[in-house]
Image (cartoon, rainbow, N blue to C red):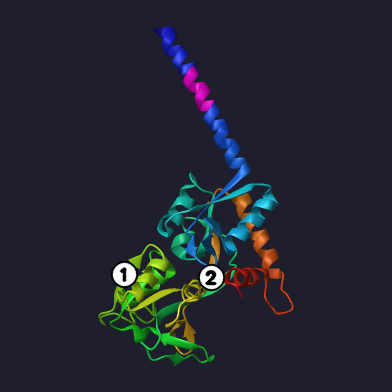
Amino acid sequence: MKKIITLLLVVFLCLSSIFAFGACNKNQDEIIVYTNAFFAPFEYYKSNEIVGVDVEIMNMVGEKLNKKVTFVDKEFDILIDTVAEGKLCDCSAAGITITDARKEKVNFSIPYYTAQQYVVFADGSFTVSNATNGDECLLWSDLAGKKIGVQRNTTGDIYVDLEINGDGEEGTEDYYAGELNGTGASLTRYDNAQLAFEALKAGIIDVVIIDEMPAQYLIKNETGYKAIGIYYDADNATTEEYAIAVNKEQTDLLNAINEVLQQLLDDVDDSGNNGVERLVKKHFGM
């Protein structure tokens, strides 16, 4: 009996060593990137393959580190927590906005794109305003009593929730929150922006709030819809910065990502577009 137990222990230890060795090899040779592939032009499906701005950026990182890069499509609301755990992926590139709450869980790369929140709606359903800079816009106050759709756990979701449920107390960091408080406005969360847009087209909701480029991409081949900036007043747009979320133990990966991003940001062409902006235009078909 004792010999059998000893033999089983030896077999178990051998198997454990084999699996551990395989896992180590994978960790050394591969970068696992979680994303949500419904956020064009930053990540989207083309012929069943995930492509986009973030994919190209991370492939450059893979070349720099001589590692294979594997993108895995997941729901947006699990990305930060999964990166923080560090068991299933190394980082997440998904047009992620830097927030203080997220910084407690993960490290962020340097910002590589400044985005503006946009509102998508049926053309003619709102009276459009003009910002001081001349751009067309809607004001948060225009959405009083409206049914608003967002992609779950995005900054659009955060903003709308604050506008509906915040108190807008002057002097607090959420001073602008509460614009829609008590107006009857409602929030509906969807798993991705495309589903929210389908709900808009079906008349289930009145508007979709999502970042600028994904908003523009949603209506790119549609007629009868507008996508314009959402403002607090004529001078104050709703903006944010994108970065890549990295597990806090992955300092070498973070450094490599920052080096690649800085090179892209410094590579400005004659038209004034940096490397990231050129990737955005490429994947937007501009």
Q: Is residue 33 left or right of residue 279?
A: left
Q: Can residue 256 be seen in the rendering of this structure?
A: no
Q: Position of residue 162 (x, y in %)?
A: 35, 74
- Which residue is painted at 55% across and 64% down in the image? 243
Disc 2 marks which amino acid? Glu
Q: Can residue 281 be seen in the rendering of this structure?
A: yes
Q: Tell me which segment is drawn in magenta.
A: 11-17
- Asked if residue 262 lies in the magenta stretch, the reply is no
Quickly name the residue at label 1. Answer: 188
Q: Quadrant of the C terminus?
A: bottom right
- Asked if residue 13 lies in the magenta stretch, the reply is yes
Q: Position of residue 268 (x, y in %)?
A: 71, 73
Quickly name the residue at label 2. Answer: 241
Q: Nearer the viewer, residue 276 or 47?
A: 47
How far apart, in angstroms, are the residues tagged by discs 1 and 2?
A: 24 Å
Which residue, as the protein is rendered here, is positioned at the far right?
Answer: 270
Disc 2, SS:
strand
Q: Is residue 185 left or right of residue 284?
A: left
Q: Mark 1 or 2, which is nearer the eye?
A: 1
Up/down of 207 relative to 248, above or below: below
Q: Quadrant of residue 118?
A: bottom left
The numbered mark, 1 or 2, whose residue comes first in the sequence reads: 1
- Which residue is painted at 43% across and 62% down in the image? 101
Up/down of 206 relative to 111, above or below: below
Disc 1, SS:
strand
Question: Which disc number belongs to residue 261?
Answer: none
Q: Nearer the viewer, residue 132 or 40?
A: 40
Disc 1 marks which amino acid? Thr
Q: Position of residue 212 (x, y in %)?
A: 50, 75
- Which residue is painted at 58% across and 67% down in the image? 111
